[in-house]
Image (tube, helix red, strand yellow):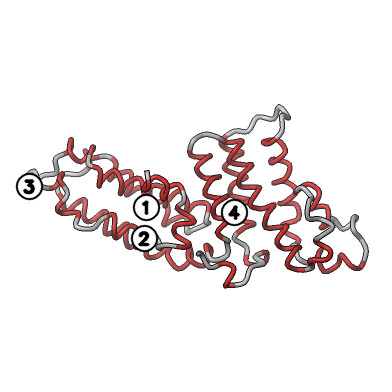
Amino acid sequence: MEGRDKLNSLLHYMKGIDPFSVIFKNATKANKTWCPFQHGEKINLDCYKSNPAVLSLLAWTEKYSFCCKFLDADRYTIDEMNIIIAKLKNPASLVYYNEFKELTNRLKELIDYLETDLKGKLERISCAECTRLDEALVCFENYCFYASIVMAVSAVESRIHELIRKADKAIYSRFAKFTLGQIIQVFDENQYTGKEYSRIKALMPAKHKPLIILLNQYRVFSAHPKEEKITAQIAESVLHLAFNFMLDAAVCPYSKKELACH
């Protein structure tokens, strides 16, 4: 159960506990001694398919690749990782331990290549936001597309509230109980036109203004009975857009101390 909890919280786990290179190193530790590789010169395929260490390695690496997509990691690297994972999942493609070792060594190289980029991105997301985004990914993986959108956009909503609160607590007190649909109106050039709002309006990059309107629209479709069908394609698109917003350093209002995981 503990392993499953960590797997379902991989973004938060990588941010605050260990980078994935450490997780992968631990998952492949002493792999030559694993049961599938102890039955003779060739890999015992039946044992390989049911071995807990193999299954755990595949689960962690698949989830990592899945997270990398939404963290906007290098797509060529992700594609190569997925090809390797597919080979590791198909025991018929493996005969000898050295073949398994070559594939896992290449995975390690790819993970190391992505490490710095992902570390920088995860450092822009608070622990509470990681929790929401992890839940959004778990919902998506379990075909709960409505819930996935609600959780992802709730992270965006929380971030916008924090942007305004940290910029001007006095003005924020007017918006503290606003829904996302209400608070994004603050950034509309035709609303809240008083000079006291100019500093707040400047917080939102122009490229994100249509984005947050779109995210709110799909949050409404997902959270309320609007008879709007949410498909896997729509949910995945909304997830990508929500992550795009959350990973932008221009809209990260937190200090280094606040972003530290406790």
Question: Can you identify the residue that label 4 sits on?
Answer: 243
Kind of element beneath mark 3: loop
Q: Residue at x 39, y 65 (%)?
A: 113
Question: Can you identify the residue that label 3 sits on?
Answer: 41
**Amino acid type assigned to the residue bearing label 3 in the image:** Glu
Q: Left or right of 237: which side holds 261?
A: left
**Residue 36: image location, x then y, percent:** 15, 44
N-terminal label among 1 and 4: 1
**Amino acid type assigned to the residue bearing label 4 in the image:** Phe
Question: Can you identify the residue that label 2 sits on?
Answer: 110
Q: Residue at x 36, y 62 (%)?
A: 21
**Amino acid type assigned to the residue bearing label 1 in the image:** Met
**Structural distance between the alpha carbons of marks 3 and 1:** 27 Å
**Structural distance between the alpha carbons of marks 2 and 3:** 28 Å
For label 1, the crowd category at 10 Å Cα-Cα, with few meaning under 14, some 14 to 19 and many 20 or more, is many
N-terminal label among 3 and 1: 3
Where is residue 195, by image quadrant? bottom right
Kind of element beneath mark 4: helix
